[in-house]
Image (cartoon, grey):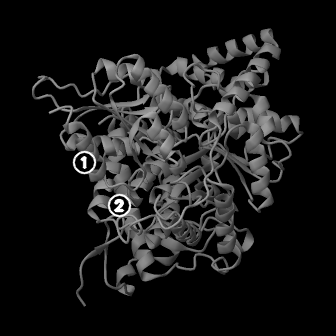
Amino acid sequence: MALSDWDINEDYDMDTRKVKILMVKAGLEGHWAGLIVVSNALRDAGFEVIYGGNMTPAEIAAAALQEDVDVVGMSSLTANYMLTIPAIIKGLKERGKGDVLLILGGIIYEDDFDALKEMGVAGIFIPGTPLDEIVNFVRDKTSASVK
Amino acid sequence: MQTEQLYTASGMPVKDIYTPEDIQDLDYDKDLGIAGKPPFTRGPYPSMYRGQVWTIRRLSGFNTPEESNKLYREEYAMGQTGFSVAPDITTAVGVDADDPIVENEIGHSGLPLNTIEDVEVAFEGLPIDRVSTYLAERGPITAMYFAMAEKRGIDLQQIRGTTAGCMLSWACLNIPRQPTPKGYLRYGVDFIEWCSEVAPKWNPISHDSYNPRDLGLNAYEELGLLFASAIDFVEEGKRRGRVPLDRFVRRFSFNTAAHNDFFEEIAKLRAARRIWYKIVTDRYGVKDPNCAKFRVHVQSSGSTHTAQEPYNNLVRIAYQTLAAVLGGAQSIHANGYDEAVCLPSDQSMLLAIRTEQIAALETNVTNTIDPLGGSYYLESLTNELEERTWDYIKMIEDMGGMAQAMQDGWYHRLLREKPIERQKKIDSGEIPVVGMNIFRSEKEPYKVPIFKPDPAGSQKIQTDKLKKFREKRDKAKHAEAMKRLVDACNSDKNVYPYTFEAVKAGATFGEVMKAQLDAYGEWPYPIGI
C-alpha cells in the first residue's frame, strides 16, 4: 500500500520541528471518513500530519520509524483493534519506537478501554468526541517532548 | 409574516407557508399522474403498498458463512421478507481469506464468501425460490449464487434478486486492489448484458448513492451522482449495442439513503422517479414505460447515529424509515440503533425489523398511495430537487461523465471535503445532534448490550476450508476454466459466461477478481489529506 500522500515538510529543522503524526487504519477497512476528519483537524491545528490510510501493523511500525513520528493515530470501526493494536505496539518496540504516542479512535468498546490503556494506548476517542478534545489531548501529551 | 430564512438540509430555502401559487405551473397529468403510470412520480406500481408492502431487507452477515446462515434464518423467522448479504471487507477488496494481505479482518462488517461452497452454506435452507436476495458485490458471487440455485433446481429465468455492482459506492470504500473506473464500467456492463440473457428477472445493478450521501453529500448531489453514474452505464450499453436498450435498462434498480430532513427525503424519491422516467424515455427513447420505473431500496443513514445515548438512534431510524415509506420505496433497511457503538446485536437487529413492521402494519400510512402528493410544500420541494439534480447531472456530464470524473479525481476530492465540512458544522452547532452537540449528558446515562465478532476464529475457519477446497477441486478442469476466463478478460468478450464456468469449475472469488484486476490494472485510491 503506497504512501502517496505524505506531507513532507521541506523546511525540516530540528529546532523548529513540528510534532509529526502518522494517521492510519490498520488493515483493509473502508470507513475512512473519521480518519480524514481527524487528520485534517490535526493539520489545521499546526501538526505535521502524514495520512497513511490503510496499512498493515508492520507497515505502520516501519513508517513510524522511517518518518520518525511522535504520534500514531489509528481509526477502527470494525472491532479488529484488539488484534491490530498489540501488533502495532510490538512492531514499534522492535524498531525502538516504543515511545510513540498511540491514540485510537472509532467504534471502541468501553469494556476494552482498560486493556487498551494497559497495552499502551494513550488516548481513546469514540464517535461524537469534539475535534478540539483530540487536538488538545495531542498538544498536551506532546508539548513536553517536542517544541 | 417575515421570520428568519430557513433551509432544508440540502440548503434549499424554505418559506413560512406554501400555497397554490407555489405549484401553479404543476401539470397534474404530465408531472404527477397516478401511481404506475408515467412519469411515475407517485409510485412505480399501480397498487403500491396496498398490493404489496415494501420488502424488509436488512443488509447483514458476520464471522463465517455458517454463522451468517443462522443469522439469515433468524431474520427470516422474525418476518424479514428479503435476504441481503453483506460480504466482509476482504470480499469487497476482492481477495480470498488466505490472501497474504488479509490479517485481521475476516467476518467484520460482513461475511467472507470465497467459494461456491461458502455460498451454498450461507443460503442453506433459505427459500430463495420465493424470497429475493440482494448481494452487495459486483458479479462473481452472483455467478456462484446462480450456480447454487441451478443445483437446487431453480430456473434462472425466474430467479429474483439484485447485485450491487455500482461504482459509486465501491469507490467510496477507498480500499486497495480496485479496478479503474473504466474497468468497473466494463465488468458492470458485462454483468448487465449477461444477466439480461440468463436471469432476466434479476436486477443486475443497483445504482447506489448511499455511501456518498452518508459521507456528507446533500439530497440533490446524491441524486445527481446516482443518475450520472446510471447514464454512464446506459451509454456504455448503447455504445456496445449487444443488448437492445429496452432490455438493458429494464432491470436497473437503485439504492439511496434516507437522511434526517423528513420532507426533503420524501421529495427526493418522488423527484428521482420523475427524473429516471425522463432519462429513459426522453433521452434514450425507450418506448416501454416499464423500463423507466425507478425502483429503489432505501437505507436509513448510519452517519446520523450517535454513540452517545444510542437509543436516540432508534427514533432517528424510525423517522427515516417513515420518510422512505412516504417516499414510496420498494425495499427498506432500517439500521440497528447500536451501529455507532458495535456491530448490531441480536436485540438491535430484532428492533430494526420491528420498526419496519410497525410502520407497515400499525400506522396505516400504507392505506393510500403517495399520501402527501399534492401538498404545496412537498410538490415544491420535489420540483426544486428535480431542477437542482438536472444541474448536478449536467455538471458531471460536462466533466466527461461519472467514470471520467472519478478517473480525474473529482469524486474523491468531493468525498474528502464533505465529511470535513459536515464535521465543522456539527462542531459549530450549525447541525444540531441531540444528545451529542446539544443536550449532551455529563455522563452517559445508560449502556446498551454489545456484540463482538470473532475475526481470529473466523479467519482460521475460512483458511482451513479454502485449503481443502483447493485440494479437492479438479485441477485440470479448474486450470482450463481459469485460462478461458483470463483470455476473456483480456479480450472484448463478455467475461461472465467464463466467470460462471470458472466458479462452477472451482475457481475461488479471489481468483476471479484477480483475473479481472490484472486485465485493467489497479487504480491507486486517491483519498488523502
Q: Nearer the viewer, mark 2 or mark 1?
A: 1
The residue at which mark 2 appears reads as B388
Q: Nearer the viewer, residue B352 or B410?
A: B352
Mark 2 surroundings within 10 Å by alpha-carbon count, few (fewer than 14), some (14 through 19), many (20 or more) = some
- In the rendered view, tell whether residue B443 sits above or below residue B201: below
- In the rendered view, tell whether residue B411 sits above or below residue B299: above
- In the rendered view, tell whether residue B346 sits above or below residue B269: above
Q: Residue at x 55, y 41 (%)?
A: A79
Name the subunit of mark 2: B
Task: Give the farthest residue toward the right.
Answer: B153
SS state under label 1: helix
SS state under label 2: helix
Where residue A145 appears, as percent x and y from the top left, is 21, 32
Label 2 sits on what residue type?
Arg
Q: Residue at x 32, y 60 (%)?
A: B426
Q: Residue at x 63, y 14 (%)?
A: B487
Task: Give the farthest residue toward the front.
Answer: A118
Where residue B44 appears, as percent x and y from the top left, is 62, 64
